[in-house]
Amino acid sequence: MTIRVVVADDQELVRSGFAMILDVQEDIEVVAEAGDGAAAVAAVERLSPDVALLDIRMPVLDGIEACRAISARSSCRTVMLTTFDSDEYVYEALHAGASGFLLKDVRRDDLVHAVRVVAAGESLLAPSVARRLIEEYTAATARPSAPDAVAAERLGVLTARERETLLHLGRGLSNAEIAAALVVSEHTVKSHVGNVLSKLGLRDRIQAVICAYETGLITAGSAGRSVSSPSGVSPSGG
């Protein structure tokens, strides 16, 4: 199946460069390029692509707002691109519905890999973003180690095994690693992951990580590892 992509960036050379890298792949087709966020949203609505690459800073409508609009109106998955390695942008993008976050100095192979991973329903973060995603941000915003009543009620819809699965998702483990930790098959883990995402209304594994912290299931400093990066994206989907 061909992965259909929209590339949006206000710098023509950057936009064309990304489009060229992707369009030469046998399984990827760039169906449109856009120079601002509003044009990107319009292209997604018109062409129904699988993935949209969005620059963070664009005129008319910035990448965050474009991502929010695309996530609300379509099933298209978004990967944010920026030269700014900023936690603020990361969290704004993730809460807007982004499935990935890459810096513009991403390697050619990692860019292609990112599109394929996100199109397959998984999520990823640039390595430098992943290293700080949990520890720095959650150190300032993490809940107490024991979940409060609201958090406990939210997690109450999960079975004990699904709660364990969410804990491991929050630590950034792949399905294979979760299977080893729980001593079950990867097929069983995939089922647990699907149930966790469905019951908690989560879009993907990145939102599961955020949920694990927001509910106090994991606290800053207790994660053990970081979320997957482009060169080490969890190979088993949710």
Image (cartoon, rainbow, N blue to C red):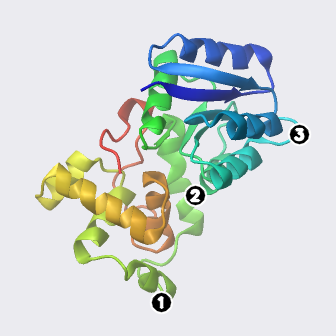
Q: Is residue 181 left or right of residue 113?
A: left
Which of pointers 1 and 2 lies earlier in the amino acid sequence?
2
Q: Is residue 218 left or right of residue 35?
A: left
| Residue 220 numbered mark, or none | none
Which residue lies at the image location 55% right of the left edge and 36% below the top edge?
50
Q: Residue furthest bottom?
A: 149
Find disc 3 in the rendering and name its residue: 60
Q: Is residue 219 visible?
A: no
Q: Which residue lies furthest to the right in this view?
A: 60
Find disc 1 in the rendering and name its residue: 149
Name the secondary structure under disc 3. loop
Give the CA separation, mark 1 to mark 3.
42 Å
Q: Is residue 136 visible?
A: yes
Q: Is residue 118 above or below residue 136?
A: above
Q: Is residue 159 left or right of residue 212?
A: left
Identity, as a three-letter code, of the amino acid under mark 1? Ala
Q: How crowded is mark 1: few (under 14 residues within 10 Å), some or many (20 or more)?
A: few
Q: In this view, does 66 lie above or below 231?
A: below
Which of pointers 3 and 2 lies earlier in the amino acid sequence?
3
Find disc 2 in the rendering and name its residue: 137
Which residue lies at the image location 67% right of the left edge and 43% below the top edge?
86
Q: Position of residue 14 (x, y in %)?
A: 71, 18
Q: Is residue 57 above or below residue 184?
A: above
Q: How crowded is mark 2: few (under 14 residues within 10 Å), some or many (20 or more)?
A: some
Which residue lies at the image location 65% right of the left edge and 29% below the top edge?
6
Name the secondary structure under disc 1. helix
Name the secondary structure under disc 2. helix
Identity, as a three-letter code, of the amino acid under mark 2? Tyr
Q: Which residue lies furthest to the left in this view?
A: 183
Q: Quadrant of residue 101?
A: top right
